[in-house]
Each structure stands twice: as C-alpha cells, then as structure tokens.
Amino acid sequence: MNLFRISQFSIVACLAGLVLLLILSLDAGRRVQEKQEAIAELLQLNERINELSAASDSLVLFGADPDLWAAYRAEGEAIRTQLERLGEQHPDARKAARRVTHMVESVGAALGDGDADNEPSRLGREIEPLEVPTRSRIVMHHVAGQGMALDTALDSALRQRQQAIAREATWIGATLAVAALIFGALCVVAFGLIHGRIARPVRSLADTLERRRAGESGARAQVTGNDELGRLAETLNRTLDERDAAEAELTRQGDLLDMAGRAARFGAWSVDLDSMTCEWSDMVAEIHGMPHGYAPTVEEGIRFYAPEHRKRISEAFKTCAERGEPYDEELQVVDANGQRHWVRTVGHPVYDEEQNIVRVQGAFQDISEQKALEQESRRLSDRLAAMLEAITDGFVAVDEQWRYTYVNATAAWILDKSPEELIGTSIWDQFPELVGSRMERALVTAMEERISNSADEFFEPLETWFDMHAYPWEEGVAVFFRDVTEDHRMIEQLRAQEAALRASRDELDAALHTRQILINSLPAHIAMLDEEGTIVDVNDQWRHFGQENLFNNGSDFGVGTNYIMLCEAAEGECSEEAKTVADGLKDVLQGERGSFALEYPCHSPDKQRWFRVMFSRLSTEGTAAGGAVAMHIDITERKLAERELNRLAYEDSLTGLPSRNGFARGMHQRFEHDDWPAGGIVAMLDVIDQHDINDAHGYKAGDQVLVELGQRLQRQAGEHGLAGRTGGDEFVVYLPSEPGQSAEDQLARIANVIDQPFSPEETGLEIEVELRIGYTELGDRPRTPEDLVREAELALFENRRETPGQTPWLAFTEELNKQTRERIRLTNELRHALEADEFELHFQPKVNLTDGSMISAEALIRWQHPERGLLPPGLFIPVAEQSRLIGPIGDWVLRAACRQLRDWRQAGLAAVRVAINVSQVQFMLGDFPAKVRAALEEFDVDPAHLSLEITESVFERHSDRLLNEIHELKKLGVRMSLDDFGTGYSSLLYLQRYPFDEIKIDRGFVNHLLDDRYSHNIVRTVMNLAEALDAEPVAEGIESNEVAAALLEMGCRVGQGYYYSMPLATEDFRWLLEMRSNLPLSPNGHGR
Amino acid sequence: MLLETSIKTLATALLPILLAVSVSYAQRSEDMVRVASAVYLGDVPTIIAEERGFFAHQGIRAEVTHHASGVLSMAKLRAGEADFALMGLTPFVLDRLANADSGGPDAPVILASLVHSIGLVQIVTTGDSGIRQAADFRGRRIAVERGTNSEFVWWLYEHYHGIDRASIELVDLSFAEMSEALMAGRVDAVVLVEPRVTKLKARLNESSQSRAVHFHVNNLYTGKWILVTSRRTAENRRALCRKLLASYQQSIEFIDREPDESIALFNRRMDVIGDILADHWSALDYDLNLDWGLIASLQKQFYWARAVGYANTGGPLRMLDLFDPNPLRDIQPGDVSIPRANVPDRAP
C-alpha cells in the first residue's frame, strides 16, 4: 500500500476512533454517576443510623408516645431492610442490620417492652422512660443532645463534601472527554496534513524525475509549500537548473580554451595508430606554417623537426606508442618557411576498453620567446651573484621548501659553514634552534605572507646577536643579516643599571605608601607628637574626627596644636579626664613612663561615645627627644555591648520589667539602703489559662495582655515597690509595708489590677483574665531576695494544685515548705525504688458471682519501702503522676504482669487473665500501644490474657489520638476495661465511641447498694448502659454476701472485693491458682 | 466570521426568552407575611434576611416584629397577628400543654429549627452579691421569666447542683425588667439571654458598680430556636412556607460566608456595643433542620413542665403531631430526619 492510500486510511480510522471515544466517555460518565448515587445512598443511610442511635438514647431517657415509638420502630425496620438489601453485595451490612435490630430490641427491653403481646404501641399507652435520677437524666440528655448535634453537623459536612466530590468528578470526566475529542480531532488533522503535505508532494517529485529521465529538459517539480518537501522540490528544480547551466558553461569554456591556445600559440594534436595519420589543431598547423586542416602522416610530421632533434622525437613517440610512456620535450622545428622555432611537445597514450594503445595525442606550443627570456635572465643572475659576493652583510636565499639556494661568502663566514655544506639543505635542518625564535617568525611571515620583515635576536648556538632582514621574492625568501653582538652587549649593560635604579625607587615608594595606608586604615585616631606635645602629623581618622568635633576653643586638633595645652584648657563635661590625660602625656614625654592609657566617656554632638586614649614614647633612651605617638580608639560599640548584656541579664525583653535576676538585684539594692521592711510582702502571680488567650486571640494579643498587666503591676507597686516578670505568664511583685494596710489589703490591690478588662489592639475585643497568687510576708526574719521569691513561688505552685474557685491567693507557710520537701523526697525515693526494684505486684481475683469461680485477677502495685514497709499505691501513685514517674512505673507494671503470666503458663497453671491499671499520663506520654505490644511479644503472652483498666479521667483529655490508641489496643486483642465508672467524667457520647469490654462499677456505689436508693439506681443504670454498650459490668468492692446476692439478682455476674479475697502476694495467689478453689475460701482454706 | 454570525444568531434567539423571563419576574406578586420574633442572639438569621433582602429575593414582603420574649411571639401567632413566630422551645411546649387543639388547624407546628447553641442563656449576679458558687444561691432571690427558657434553665441548674427549690425565692420578671432589678438590688441573680447579658454587663461597667459574675449552664442546656406557624398555614400555604425557609437558608449561608458582616448587622440592629457574637461564635451552630435532637429537647421540656406542675389540658401528647416537616423536606430533604407520622403500625 503506498503512502497516499495509507494516509487516507488513517483519516478514516481516526474518525472511527473518535466516535468510539465519545461512546466510551458517555458510558464512563454514566457509571461514575451510578457510583456517586450509591455513595450518597450510603451516606444517607449512615445519617439515618446515627439519628436512630441518638433517638434510642432519647427514648430511654424520656419514653415515647405510641406514635413516636411506632415511628422509631418503623425507622429501625426500614434501616434494617435497606441494610439487608445492601448485604447482598456487602456481607458486613448484614451484621449492621442485626445490630440495628438488637439496638431497637434493647431499647424496647429497657422500656419494659419484653414480649410482643405486651408491645406498647399495640396497647396504645405511653412508654415510660428509664427510671433515672433527674440529675442524671439532665446530664445524659445534654450529652446525648450534643452528640446528635455533632452527628447532624458531621452529616451536613459529609453531604457537602460528597456533593463537592461529585461536582469535581463530573468536571474531571468532562475535561477528559473534551481532551479525548480534541486528541481525536488532532489525529484527523494530523493525518490530513500527512496526506496533503507529504503524500501528494512526494508523488509530484517522482513524476518530475520520470519526465526528466524521459528527456524532457524543461520538466520541473511542483512546489507545494515552504516545508521540507517544498524545499526538496525547490532543491531538485535548482539542481536541474544548475545542471543545464553547467552544460552551457562547458560549451563556453571550450570556446575560451581555443582563444587561450591562439594567444599562447598553443595547440593539440592526435595520431591514429591504425592509420598513422596526424590530426593537428589550427594553431599547430600555423606553428608549422601549414594551412588549417592540414593532416600529415607521422613521418611527415617528424620531418618538420630540426635534423638534430628528429631522432629524439622519433624515439619518444615510439616509446609512447608502444609502451605507453608519456613524453614532454623542448625541441626545435623548421616551419614551411624555413624559420626555426623552439617548441614544447607533450605526448600521452590513449587506451581502448581492452587497454590497447589506440592513439597518441598531446599538446604543442611555440616557446621561442620563452627560450629567449630564459637566456636573458641567466645573464642577469650571474651579475647579481657577483654583487652579493662582494657585500659585507651576510646574504642567503632560500626556496619555498626552505632550502638554501644561495649563500654569499660573508654569510658562510658568519654561519661558520661553507656554501657547499649549506646549499640544497634545509635552513631548519642546519639550524633547528631557529624554530620558535623571532627570526623564524620573520622568515615565515616573509615566506607565507609575502611581507618584508626583520628580527633582532640573540642566536644561542652561535652565541651571536643577529640583525636579520627577510625579503620575499618569487622563488622564496632573500635574507640579509649581520652580527650585532657588540652593540647588544653595551645596551644590556645600560638597561641593567637603569632597572636597578628603578627597583630601588619603587621599593622605597611602596614602603612609604603601605605605612601611610596602614596608619590611615587603623580604626584609631593617631597623631605624632614632638617632645613638647605639639602635633606634627595625624592620620585620616584623627583629621576627620577633629574637623567634625571641634574642641570647645574651636581647635580641630590639627597639626601644630599643642595637645597638653588643649587638654589643660578643657572645660565642662570631660574636663576632669582631660587633665588626667595631660598629666599622663607629660609623664610619657618626660620619660617617666613608657606609655599611658585611659578610657573615658565623651559626648559627641549627636550621641554618647567612649574612647580609649594611649600615649607611647618614641624614644627608648628615657628622654623626651623622640616625642610620642597619641592614639584614640573609639570603644563605643564595646561599651554599648556591655550595657546590652547587662540589660539582657536583668530585664525582661517583652515587658521591660526586671527579670528574675533583675528583681533580685533590685531587692538587694533596696535592702542595702533601707531597713528590713517587716510589713512588706513578695507575691508571685500567674495568669490563669493564659494559653487559652493565646489560642483564642493569638500570641501577639496574649503578649499585649502580659505587657499591659506588667504595667499595671508596676503602677500598683509604686515608687518604693518593685514588679518583675519571671517568665511565661508569671510575675513577681514586692509591695513595701503601708501604714494601716494588712497583707490581705495589699494582695487585694494586686488582684484589683485585673478589674478592668484588657483590650489588645490586635483583637478589638475586651479580654478578662484571672490571676492566681502565691505570696510570702517578709515578717521580722530577714531573708535574701532569692529566698523570698522562692517562697512566693512555692505558694503559687501550691495554689495551682488547689481547687479552682477558692481565694485567689495563698500564703507561704512552713507547713507548705515541709510538704513540698516531703513531696520532693518521695519523688527521689520513687526514682530510687525503680532502680532498686522495690515494687511488687499483688493480685485480687475477679470471680463469677454465681459460683465463686475465679475468672481473672487485677494486678495491684505495692512498694516495699526499705524503712516504711509495704506501701499501698494511694500513698505514692499521685506523686508519681505529678512527677511523670508514672510512665516508667506503668511500664514496670506492664512488664511485671506479662512476666508473671509467662511464669504461670510455663508452670502449667490454668490460664487466667490479668488486669493492670493504666494512668491517663501513660497515654499522654505517647506510644503506649507499642509498649504493650513489645511487652506481650517479649514474654510471649496471648493478648487475650491481658486486660487494661482505664479510669474515666482519661475522657477529661479526650482526643482523636487517645481514641485511636485505645482502638489500636483493642485491635491488638487486649481486653479494655473502664474503671471506677460513675466517679468521673463519662459521657454517653464517649462510651459509644470507645470499645470497652467491661465497665467496673465503683465501690462507692456497690458498698451502699443495700442502704441507699440512689446508689442502687446508679448501679442499675450502669448495668443497663453496659448492656447497651455490649460490655460486661463488673462490681468492685464487694464486702458481704448480701451485696453479692443483690448484685446477682440485678443481673451482675462478675465482681471482686474483700468478701471473696483481698489482694494477694504473688506466692499466695499462685497457691490459689494451684488449688483451683471457688471463692470465698472457707476457714480451712477450701472453697465454698 | 462564522463565530460572529453564530453569536448574532444566538443573541437573536435568546433575547425574547430573556425579555419574557424578566417581565415575568417583575410582574410576580410578593407574598405578605408577618413574622413575630424576639430579642435573642439566636435570631441573627431573621435580622440578616431583613437586612440583606433575602425575604424579598424569595418574593416575600416580610413584616418582622421583635418582642421581649418568645412567649409574646407565640401569643401573636395564637392571636392571628402573626403568620410565623420564632421562639425557644419552652413557650411552644407550654402552649401545647395549655391548649386542647392539638392536631387542629390553629395548633402551632414546628417548621424547622434554626440554631443549636450553648452559652446564650446565663445566670448573672453582681460581684458584691457574695454569690461565688452554686451553694451560695440558697436563700437568694432569683429572677426568671416564667414560661420562657429562663425558667427551664434555672430548674436544670438547681437540680444539677442539688439546690432545694424551697431554699430560694423565684421572682417572675420579664427579660426587659431583669437588669434594672439586679442593679437596684431587688433580686440577687437573674437568668437572662444574650444579647441582654452583654448589655447588662456594659451597664454595670458604666455605672462603676460591682462587675458582673456569670454562671454558665453550658454543661446542662442547649438552646434551640424554632420557626413555628399554624397547621392551617403549613398545609394551605405550603409554597409560602418553602419560600420563607429558603430565605432563612440563604441567611444561614451568608452568616457562614460573611461572619464579620453578620455580626455588625446584628449589633447595629440590636443596639449592642462590642462584639458579643464573636464571643459566642464557636457555640453557635446555625443550621436549618428537623432531627431527633429536637424531639429529645422537646421531650426534656415536657418532662420538666410535668415535673414543675404545668398541667396538661391538651390531651395525650403525640410528639410527631408537633411538626410539619413537609415544606423543609420539599426544599432540603437531607435535613429532615424525624420519622414520618403515618407509620403502618400506628396504634389505634
């Protein structure tokens, strides 16, 4: 298939592809829309499930009328049906459907809807809510309501996001379709272009070449454009044009050759060896004095040569005709008129296809005039040689191959070689040292550029200076040269003397210049003084400073000024230092001291400056004969840096108030000058929740609040008091005693500084802040300022630990001091206990309340204190949590529990699950799941045998990270337990989201189960909640059989407490495991 | 050339259509409605709809009146002096208990909830009242406006903190009277709504009296602001209800988009100095919806009303009869998640 057809076929294929692309794009768009509708349906279903879940809480709390109850159930049924339908494709949806059914049934069960016949909506009666204390109902509803609002907001956000994604997908699809269409269209265009711009021009080119070959001289290709093929057609046409022109030029050149032959009396001849006849050109015939067209035989032709040359030409012709050897001879002929002519005849053999010589042909020229000129030239040359031999300069001639062709006698003498040695040899062979020299360049220039040139150079091999001149001539270069060695020797001597003089002068100038630059570039004002103290020379700095800062008598401290007199005449601010300087200078000039230096402040017109003045005696002989050098150095920068360092050390950069060190220094200064101010106080305060201000309004606004607060405190402290900022949001204030004012009054003054709200410019808002204050009264016992600040700080620290809402200030007391020391001591002991391995685990069984069989155990840490004996966790865990030691202690418990589980397993004891308590601090420290995983792997413990008990307090710091970590632990296979439920902060919302396997009912409720209706209701509510959350309720603190029985009657199956067993040491608990007895044990150690 | 010709042809074809549409729009008659609202920070959407012309944009000529409380809004609706009313849940719940026409044409029905908020109702006292914690309220005079959310909120607070009702004296005052009474010392604390709380605080500052002390009930009470009309209006003028809801939706979208301008408009209309809306912004969630959360809140208020002795003379309570979700479902089906009333297994 040729190119033309292929391009047509491609265009049709592209059109078909375009149509197919359109169809595929429409189909893909339809599929994407179907998927989006499916996602929207799932989102809507998820929203309905969230609503139903929320409605469940509401119905449990407030009951329902029959219509609402029926609507709730119908909604549940509708969701279940839709999930079942989805389950055909997604099996997990069936699980969800069952959970929806369970949820609806759970709500029904909780509301007394036990059996279908008694179903409330069928009876048309109100469904009573769960019996819950009003306070609990209020709180639970509020939390559930927040959850509903959150779900609604999240659903709304999801819907908006899903719509945005749908719009984006549609846009992307449309873009892709348009791009595909454009691509298809471009393909059609591309192949159209191939057809129009390639296939057709190629066909035109081929036709043109065919026509040309057929002999059509005017045939030319059609030029279709400016592209490559167009240019190819143009090139072809141009080539054809050039070929036609070349043929015409060939004809013209033939004519010109004829003309040249006539001018140079030059012609051609040819001899056919078969017929042995000659063919002469017109010019050859003319040279022989024969008419045009004359064609002699070979013999006749040879007879025209002079008799003495006939033999030679006959042999040359014969040799050429027989052996093919060409010849070129200069001979004489005698023309038809008897005139002799010198001719040059050239003969060449001509071969046929079998390499037989069939013809001899050649050229024939009359060279009579040329021969006459040669003779004249030779005569002149002889005369020139004679002249050259006579001159005193050396003269040589070299040809174009640089061979000596002539050497005169002088040249031979200078070069120390005979002419015979030199002529015919190359100048470079004879004198290779010339290569690279100036003489070589002069010779080459004359030879190649045909320009006369000269060189003056010392030639090492001959130890001679040459003055050489080279002149181009037609056969090469003519060279004159002479020995100028003596001239050069004299010049060299003169130059050496001049250079030595110049070098000495330059060195002197350079030394002087360097010294001047050095002195001028020094950052000091330098002056040279004579023995009287008069300035005799100054550097630039001295000069400029003097001109810019005229002395008080108008002097510019310039040359001629007497330095001592000027200093002695000084008045005003620096006059005292000036007199000291004058005395110092006198001492130096009189040789009483070698040098003098003084630092002094000086007020230049625009700013405060400091200088260091130094005098150094020039004479070393102890007399004033040599004068002195005065030097002033500006040390302002150094002085300012010292001041700034001082400021940074004692001043807070944000507020400008004294820093902690600055405050202490200020107090020291006050105490040094005044008596001990017994009635004063030192208070340290901080802003409550300053970070909230920063988070809400930005750090800039927060900083502005701190600055304003600092200013108010400073105003409150007054002239005799002192305020400082010790860091972050902490300030310290010293208020001296005021007549008639108690410490409380003074503290109230501090607290009042926040009566007016703060208005940072950044926000345009008014911000109210609260303060927390710790203080110490100075009393009669003197202390250092550092001790006072530390006491106030201690009181502030204790105030932070206090319950909010109390009096905002707290005083330092010795008891507080003692408590703090005790806490620090306990922290240190705990740290030591970890290193000394003083902790141990005790285990309290969790039992099945129906038969007393052991289900699991709770591991409880004990501290075997070396002096105080066995300590329960309540005495040291709070301190450990404060000091963050809970992290390593928690890790120890985790690993100790896992190690114990491994030991029991290796001892062949029945597997029992062990629960350990986890502090929220352990979660805050980060990466807790990884630690659990590592401990399980290290001791090869089945995760199902480990349970983690977490108190409700973790929810106070709820975060997505906490939720993820608990889910990660759950996924690991560890059992999660919510400890002390009912004592802290648990919302239904969180309970729904956290995957707890069990909920432990706090001992406080269990203990009063029988005698307090409130506790009874709480226990029942928690059990209902646990059931709704699919978690196991576990009762803590069971101390009697009656309580155990009541719990069992309420449906609680698992519990722990002293009634069954107290926490046991490891050995005792192991014994219990080995016994496999039910609990509680009878007095004889057997199970009941 | 071809492009120019195409544009001319298209313009010629579209011109009559554009003219017809604009004439039709100009000739469309506006619906006149009377909206009774109350001075409350949750009512920002109404202010925005008025100021930004969203009512007019939907073809509604709205005559909005702002009353001292939602109780008066409900009274205007009941008296036929308003077509729509905005209020908290308490006036609606008490109206339902007091009237026996539930399900009848004049019975109020909820069209939508407009806002979900916390912090807009606060218990306020003065710094020199000596009240620093919940227990300090014992023996004090507390001002609430009966029939409004303030009464309900106080009940939540006293139950949560275990304050015996007999240990305090509840004084019935309108919201407008509360600030004066507190400053004059006639009461020790007031249960007040925004923006009145902020105004009270400003007045205390101006008069150099003791500063205001706030007791938040954020952990107990979530505010709802509902749009109510009569069942007759909801069923017979459903298109009007749709338009009104659409204009509120436009307002809410504007608030989300331009919070600063919304704050400024509200402050100007309510004569509030300062940026109170900004202080509460994170606690305000404007959203047009009908969900189980609203049902739960209503249930909680009915529970309260029964607990404090409001008699139910309106017959058995049918929760789903209190709504007409159809107009909202027409325009935003995704925001209606309360169940439909006519379920198959409805009790006889």
Image: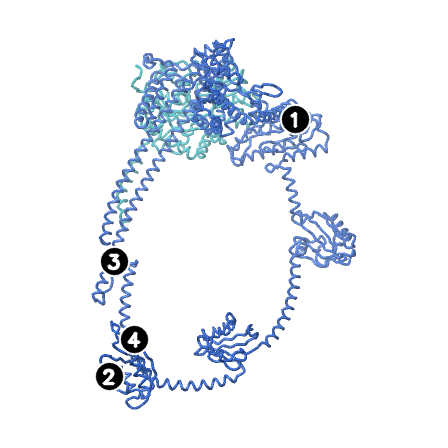
Chain colours: A blue, B cyan
- Front residue of A576/A408: it is A408
* Mark closest to the chain's N terminus, 1 or 3: 3
Q: Point out the tag, 3 or 4, that comes first from the N-terminus.
A: 3
Callouts 1 and 3 on one subunit? yes
**Given contact means CB atoms under 8 Å apart, are the residues at marks 1 and 3 in contact?**
no
Which residue occupies 71% across, 32% down? A671
Residue A790 bears which disc, if any? Answer: none
Disc 2 designates what residue?
A295
Residue assigned mark 1: A776
Q: Chain of mark 2?
A: A
Above or below: residue B115 compared with residue B19? above
Tag 1: residue type?
A: Thr
- The answer to whether one can see residue B145 in this image is no
In this rendering, which labeled residue sits more in front, label 3 or label 2? Answer: 2
The reply to whether callout 2 and callout 1 are in contact (CB within 8 Å) is no
Chain hosting mark 3: A
Distance of mark 4 from mark 1, alpha carbons?
127 Å
Instruction: Residue under label 3, please give it.
Output: A202
Q: Which mark is nearer the camera, 2 or 4?
A: 2
Q: CA distance from mark 1 to mark 3?
A: 107 Å
* Mark 3 residue type: Val
In x, y percent, where is residue B200? 51, 26
**Residue A963 x, y percent position in the rendering:** 45, 27
